Amino acid sequence: MTAAHWIPHSGVAGLAWPALPPAPGQRTLAIQFQLDRSQWLEPDAIASQQFRQLRYLVKHAQERVPHYRDHLRRSTISGPDAIDAQSFLRWPVLSKPDIQQGGDSLLARGLPEHHGGAHWVTTSGSTGQPVRVANSDSGAFFQHALLLRSHLWFELDPRGKFAIIRATSPKAVNRDWGIPANTAFHTGPSVILSAFEDHRAQLNWLRSEAPACLQAHNTNLRALMATSLRENLVPASIRTVIGFADMPPPDIRAQILAHWNARYFETYSCSEIGTLALQCPRHDHMHVQSEHVLLEILRPDGSPCAPGEIGRVVVTDLHNFAMPLIRYELGDQAALGPPCPCGRGLPVLQVIAGRTSDLAIDPTGRTFFAHLNMGFWATVAPITQRQIVQLAPDRLEIRYVAERDLTTDEIAGLVREIRAAMRYEYAINCVRVPNIRPGPGAKFVDFVSMIRG
């Protein structure tokens, strides 16, 4: 596949090539034009542009977001124009409890002109701590821009069918790939399946739909590959596999190539901000998406880690003016690497010590990916952290951290939502605990199976 297949569609009758796209397509192409060039800037030039954008964000946050009104003074920074790589290290880190407890104090009292409206995103991320984050329309636009960049970096063929398997989406058939690709380009159809389907059923669905590209959680890919090898069910049409969320198994890339004859690409993202890093088109490591995020790797004392040194991930969304996330600690561990031989100036993300998850099962023998990253964790009950433990094929335990015991109605609401999501009437016990410790390697696991063998 070459870029020749990404031919923009026209909004003007009779003018097909070169095309004159409608306004949304023009915006999409304009940002891709810039991203195609910014990736090749020298690292110092990229950092300079990041801090230029950051100063606009900080000025807005200081003036319109109550939570940040005192941050410049607390950081001993004279003003937004004085923010640079060194002074920014004094800016307080924003934690998930800060968001949980901050409420409306993190919301902007008005947006700049042309930033559009705002919408809510709910996530538990890699720590099991549910948070609700507001994002602006302009912030979402940049998230979409990086999604399209991934399509171009991974050399996807827009004429093919795109399949997505994820926990948060019901089964669907769409005539195109959706936003952002369809704003500027003609694409093939897309199909979506819930990750709560049995893995044999997922493979049979893939064989029936015959997509060229598959995107799925890495934990789900692990089970799909194991089932494919065991039962000789090969989705032969797939040429590209894109993994996200949990840590990929160390041999998944080689397995997908050997048994499915497909390429594997890894992405790193969070629901609060979107894409943080994408795999290099020519190498197995990832590039930080610095046009959208300022990503730091810090030691426990707050100083920057050296290349190759694992530390905590702190990110700043440079474009969300609705609820600015400035120096937001994700709860992940990672390490930066040396410059990439490909020539891109975007920082190399060498190691992500994220989480891994077990697979769930029910008494019928159905195995499935049980990442319940859903809004009810943040809305149905005052839970600050949670973990699901499968004790038996028909029995779950919900361990939660909260300032008080949940009420009978709150527990009933949780049980109802979990049973509906996991598609089985599990016996569910809710247990309040003082804390939930990370597993080996400081990795938080949001679903744990005690069933072995």
Image: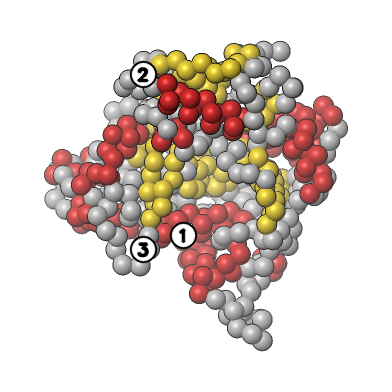
Tag 1 near tag 2, CB within 8 Å: no
Amino acid under disc 3 = His
Residue 42, relative to residue 11: is it above or below?
Answer: above
Q: Label for residue 115?
A: 3
- Residue 72 at x, y percent in the picture: 17, 46
Identify the residue under disc 2.
Answer: 405
Q: Earlier in the sequence, mark 1 or mark 2?
A: 1
| Residue 219 in view in this figure | yes
Q: Secondary structure at mark 2?
A: loop
Q: Residue at coordinates 77% horizontally, 44% vertically from top-left? A: 206
Q: Nearer the viewer, residue 180 or 80?
A: 180
Q: Nearer the viewer, residue 373 or 138?
A: 373
Q: CA distance from mark 2 to mark 3?
A: 41 Å
Q: Secondary structure at mark 3?
A: loop
| Residue 335 in view in this figure | no
Q: Label for residue 307?
A: none
Give the number of callouts. 3
